[in-house]
Image (spheres, helix red, strand yellow):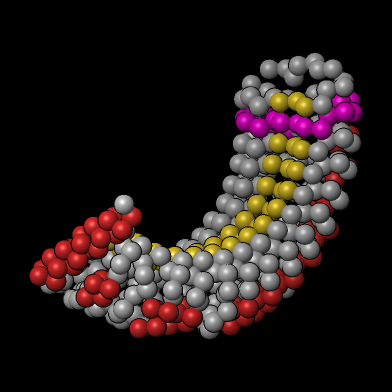
Amino acid sequence: MEFPVVPCDIRSLYMSTNAIEQVPSSIGGLSHLFLLDLGWSTGLESLPDSICNLKSLREFRIGCCENLKELPENLGNLESLEKISADGSAIKELPDSICNLKKLATLSVENCVNLLGLPANLGNLKSLENLCASGTGIKELPESICSLQNLAALFLGNCVNLQGLPENIGNLESLKVLQAYGTGIKKLPDSFGNLKQLIVVDISDCVVLHGLPESFGNLESLRRITASGSGIKTLPSLTGFPLLVVANLDFCGLLEFPSTLCHIVSLKELYIGGNNFETIPDTIKKLSRLVQLELSDCMRLKYLPELPSLSILSANNCTCLESASCLFQLQSIKALQFGNCINLDGDECSKIVDHLLATSWQREVSLS
């Protein structure tokens, strides 16, 4: 299919179709164009160099162009460009000139499986706020990435070849979101604790990551940590975290319940099922804001201590659990799961159910 003739003063051009096989060089004459969408053009194998003449272009979309293997070398001439979306394309590398894009705020190359690296001078993108390289083949990040003072979100999920982060990652003073789940990261740099603006960190399924740096406790803005399925066996001191609301440590193979968690008084949701600890410290009752506790598949857990005033408690498949008498103290429980807890005493279970029914009835009466 030939590219259609369009008026030269057009501002937006959407050609998201698998029928497009070639973009004519005359496209460079669209001097007012600020959005070019060629996404899903599966027949497109190359782009004309004249695209680099689009001085007004702000957004460039080439997502899912599965046969497009390279970008024009002079892409850095697009001086107004603010966003590049190339998710799912076949590109093998980004041209070095891309680092000249002074206004670029978003660069997304998610699921570009043939992309094995990022330009060495990536740090020159001073306006970059969002970088998504999840699902790519990158093996390492350039050191210059630590110069991106405006970078707020870094997505690296399922980069299975990525074995580490730059030592100076803590220099990213604006970073708020870091997703590095399913990577081959073996350790987090000591400077990690300098990420004072970090709100969300996801290191789930990082199976060769066996611990966190001592500086991790310095993340004063952290609100959510997800490390389920990681190789983390122990936690450093976590007495800070005044804003942490959600912690997910499911299936980490923890041999002991991290007592340090009991100092995070802001915690509202704790997911720590699928681990190998036998006991929970009594200090868990200090978590006065905790409303949801997930303990399912903790098959060595034998008893529950006095718990805070929970709304949701899940303890399915805790096959060694012998006593749950603490539930008689819970007044605000709304959801309770104890499926396949085969060692729980039947009489105790019946009394707990009667107690919860009575508590629920009293609560309804008080509200009526």
- Does any portion of residue 147 appear in the rendered image? yes
- Does any portion of residue 90 appear in the rendered image? no
Going by the image, does 257 lie left or right of 317? right
Query: 210 or 219: nearer the eye?
Result: 219
* Number of on-image labels: 0
Query: 244 or 129: nearer the eye?
Result: 244
Question: Which quadrant holds residue 149?
Answer: bottom right
- Residue drawn at x 76%, y 16% is 4
Question: Which quadrant holds residue 73?
Answer: top right
Residue 340 at x, y percent in the picture: 19, 63
Q: Is residue 88 above or below residue 292?
A: above
Task: For the N terminus, give its image quadrant.
Answer: top right
- Residue drawn at x 39%, y 64% is 292
- Residue drawn at x 65%, y 37% is 63
Question: Which quadrant holds residue 287?
Answer: bottom left
Query: 295 or 71: nearer the eye?
Result: 295
204 part of magenta stretch: no
Residue 26 at x, y percent in the picture: 86, 23
Going by the image, does 16 lie left or right of 173? left
28 part of magenta stretch: yes
Going by the image, does 139 lie left or right of 212? right
Q: Is residue 255 above or below residue 71?
A: below
Part of the protein shown in magenta: 27-46
Q: Is residue 199 above or below residue 43?
A: below
The single residue placed furthest to the left in the displayed view is 347
Residue 333 at x, y percent in the picture: 31, 63
- Predominant secondary structure in magenta? loop
- Residue drawn at x 86%, y 26% is 30
